[in-house]
Image (cartoon, rainbow, N blue to C red):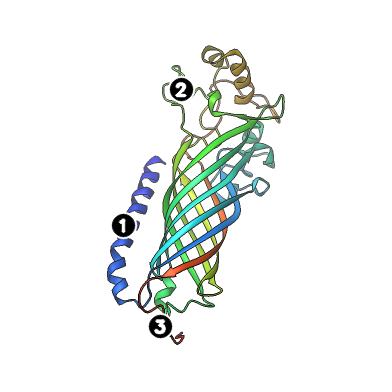
Amino acid sequence: MKQFLHSVGRCSLLLLVSACTCISSFGQSSESSSVFEAGISVGPTNLLSDLGGNAGKGTKFIKDNNFPATKLIFGAYLTYQPNEWLGFRLALNRGTLVGDDALIKGKGGLEEARKNRNSDVRSRITEGMLLAEVYPTVFLEGDPSDVVGRIRPYGVIGIGFFHFRPQGTDPLTNEWVDLQPLHTEGQGFAEFPGRKEYKLTAFQYTLGAGAKYFFSEKVNLSLELLHRTTNTDYIDDVSTTYIDPSYFFAHLSNAQATLAKRMANKSGSVGAPYGPGQKRGTSTNNDAFFSINLKLGFRLGRGGNDYSQTRCPVRF
């Protein structure tokens, strides 16, 4: 999985660099000029992690998406388009990701083990992204600078980082509790040298697609799907196996250890409780999340001398 992430990252960077090298040559033959666009976005977002899911073996993306766990993500962005077919977007988003084993509908299959784990998570995220947008249908347009009334499909690829803060509900008080300081799987404990304490900032690689409609030369509306593959398996604080609760008392204060014991193992809702060494998560699959964004954009201005000239619409 990690090799796959590195490959995706290298490909993303390569495509971004390749796109940059094409700007100059294409710009000389294009009638359109550079333009900046600023806007806001909002839409549903869902976590794809060890928690929750549907019947059978856990997989990725839509199959294991739990719609009741949907939350909203809000954002703002600034895009620079050197021409009409290519754009570079800098975006900042804020939202919440949720996962809950209680949402699993048990059908007597492999999903029963996850449901019996009985864990949940709420993780607030702040995300920054650098994305490249490609509008392939521009090459089929007679006059790409005449945008009014057009619908343009586009693809998105890029990289980013995000800060997250996993919390779980305390079964005793039903209050949300920060999970990372509790070392629920022994992260950072000397007895588990392979489990380093995870950081609350991680990287992600983004792929997506969307369509943009132009109400006027200045205002447009877009709908897009963005999928993020991350380099962390701890957005939900679940990755490896259960540990002996005595390790909590050896490394944490008595109050923290007592809380960690409750939060690390809430299993037993539909079967026998799990014990030390038994599977808690799948460390070979990093977490992911996706969003469906509705974007309202405003073009701020256009460079070049042809923008102020009178043009006759040309379409084919």
Give left or right: position of 238 versus 54: left
Q: Which mark is residue 188?
A: 2
* Helix, strand or loop for disc 3: loop
* Helix, strand or loop for disc 1: helix
Mark 2, residues whose alpha carbon is within 10 Å: few (<14), some, or many (≥20)? some
The residue labelled by disc 3 is 309
Q: CA distance from mark 1 to mark 2?
A: 38 Å
Give left or right: position of 248 versus 14: right
Q: CA distance from mark 1 to mark 3?
A: 33 Å
Q: Which mark is residue 17?
A: 1
Type of amino acid under label 3:
Gln
Q: CA distance from mark 3 to mark 2?
A: 65 Å
Q: Residue at x 50, y 46 (%)?
A: 127
Task: Judge whether residue 187 can be spotted in this image.
Answer: yes
Please identify, in this view, whether the residue under mark 1 or under mark 3 is nearer the observer.
3
Please identify, in this view, whether the residue under mark 3 or under mark 2 is nearer the observer.
3
Type of amino acid under label 1:
Val
